[in-house]
Image (cartoon, coloured by chain):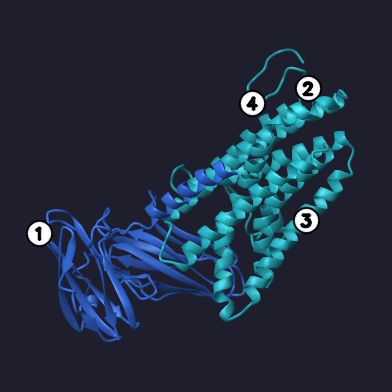
Amino acid sequence: MFPTFLIGLREGLEASLVVGILVAYLVKTGNGHRLRPLWGGIATAIGISLAFGALLQFTSAEMSFKAQEAFGGFASLVAVAFVTWMVFWMRRTARHLKAELHGRLDTALTLGPLALALTAFVAVGREGLETALFLWAAVQSTGQSATPITGAVLGLLASVVIGYLLYKRAVNLNLKTFFTWTGAGLVVVAAGVFAYGVHDLQEAGLLPGLNTVAFDVSEHVPPSSWYGTLLKGIFNFSPKTSVLQAAAWVSYVVPVLYLFFRPSRPAAAPAAPARQTASV
Amino acid sequence: MRASFLLTLPLALALAACGGSSDGGSTASGGGAVSVTSSDHACEVATTAFDPGKITFDVKNTSKDVTEVYVYGKGSGGQFDKVVGEVENIAPGTSRDFPVQVTSGEYEVACKPGQAGDGIRTKITVSGDTASAPQDAAYDREVKVTAKEYAFTGLEGFQAKAGEKVEFKLDNAGSMEHELEILGPDGKAVGEVGPTAPGKDGEVIVSLDKPGTYTYLCGIADHESRGMKGTFTVS
């Protein structure tokens, strides 16, 4: 049961963390009524993933390896774009808060419902198909044993609980700490997703260099161990990382964290790493 | 929400459709899935000689660990490191299947219990064309099917007993490319004669193992909906 528990935990963890932070953000800024589109996005992602996964597992429909990897890769890149944009959107709101311009919060939130729904949708949907396939395979084997499905469901539930605990903790932080740490946390998570997406596209053969390995520590960090699971679930850390994957991670995390921690100026709203050379 | 739903679903379906397209060739086992058993210390592949085309591997994990199975072809360096197919996250006690397209040559099937390392490898060979594979030679009887725009003839009233091995010989008397796909009572493909040019023929041997209603059709373009479809019964 433990192995399936760990897979469930790993697949659910990253989405739970992102959703936990988004919910905390909305509640903290007094926008609890905006939660509805967020849940809508999550429910839609789960629904589509389960339906499509069932189609693949129980009927003769098949998805070629390349198509599946390409889907995973592109979905990851879309998720990274949304989460990055979200981070800077939150950062801008934080600045209004700092300037005690509470009234302007609503302006920042006008981007609201659809953007929130889409972010939640891609955060959950990215790993949704793979998770659904894994779940349905467990369901299919319940004739012989109910252990796989029990472990998988408990794992997913555990990831949701962790997301909830993060939310509880985050809601009680003071605003400045909240924005700094959740924002930086999201950037690191997004960097992992970006590198993972690159790896998927390498496996699909759309990007080269799959076997040009930067490092391989799978001897020391077995993917099926609990710590391997947590590293993978939170940071998308692969024990065997290709050079391109590592380069992608660095080239995302360095400029984005720089932009994130850069002292804020009134006019700046960098959704993309557009270089601004004005004095700080 | 609606917008994202409408955007995503067709994309996913389109990917599935292109992945599930019926390319030519039949597997050595007559079109059924090839079982792979991944245990703690072994990787048993039921068949190791194949015809070119699509192979569906059905992986059963009997080990204590989560496993994954890769099919590798030869990469540019001559090593078996080019991924041609893969399935991850197979929990202990569960089964997953995955399709692979292969051409003539050598491949390695690698089971990776614990999801790390190079895996336990089994070499498989893909050779020849569909007609000459020796293990396909034995069959109980032959039935001729003629394809034209847009109908099949020859299978009207065809019946078989469960367990019979039948060679379906497709003769394309039309002016377009046609194929013959045969689906079992559960809707899963049991064999097919891949795309066959006008004036050419092809054959496939199918083990009609399960009783029930089988469906045959042409999977090219919209030929099925234009009438190239039918059923027969296995008792």
Does A102 sit above or below residue B97?
Answer: above
**Label 3 packing within 10 angstroms: few (<14), some (14-19), many (20+):** some
Comparing labels 2 and 1, the label whose residue is closer to the camera: 1
Letter of the chain shown blue in the rendering: B
Q: Identify the residue position indicated by label 3 in the image.
A: A162
Q: In this view of the protein, which residue sits in the foreground, B112 or B6?
A: B6
Q: Identify the residue position indicated by label 4 in the image.
A: A273
**Distance between the alpha carbons at the discs numbered 3 and 4:** 31 Å
Letter of the chain shown cyan in the rendering: A
Quadrant for the N terminus of chain B in the image = top right
Residue A166 shows in the view: yes
Please give the chain letter of the residue carrying mark 3.
Answer: A
Q: Identify the residue position indicated by label 1 in the image.
A: B199
Does A213 sit above or below residue B208?
Answer: above
Q: In this view of the protein, which residue sits in the foreground, B119 or A274?
A: A274
Q: Position of residue A201 (x, y in %)?
A: 49, 45
Please give the chain letter of the residue carrying mark 4.
Answer: A
Does B197 sit above or below residue B163?
Answer: above
Which amino acid lies under the numbered mark 1 shown in the image of this protein?
Gly
**Label 1 packing within 10 angstroms: few (<14), some (14-19), many (20+):** few
Q: Identify the residue position indicated by label 2 in the image.
A: A264
The lab-note entry on whether marks 1 and 4 share a chain reads no
Classify residue A265 by image quadrant. top right
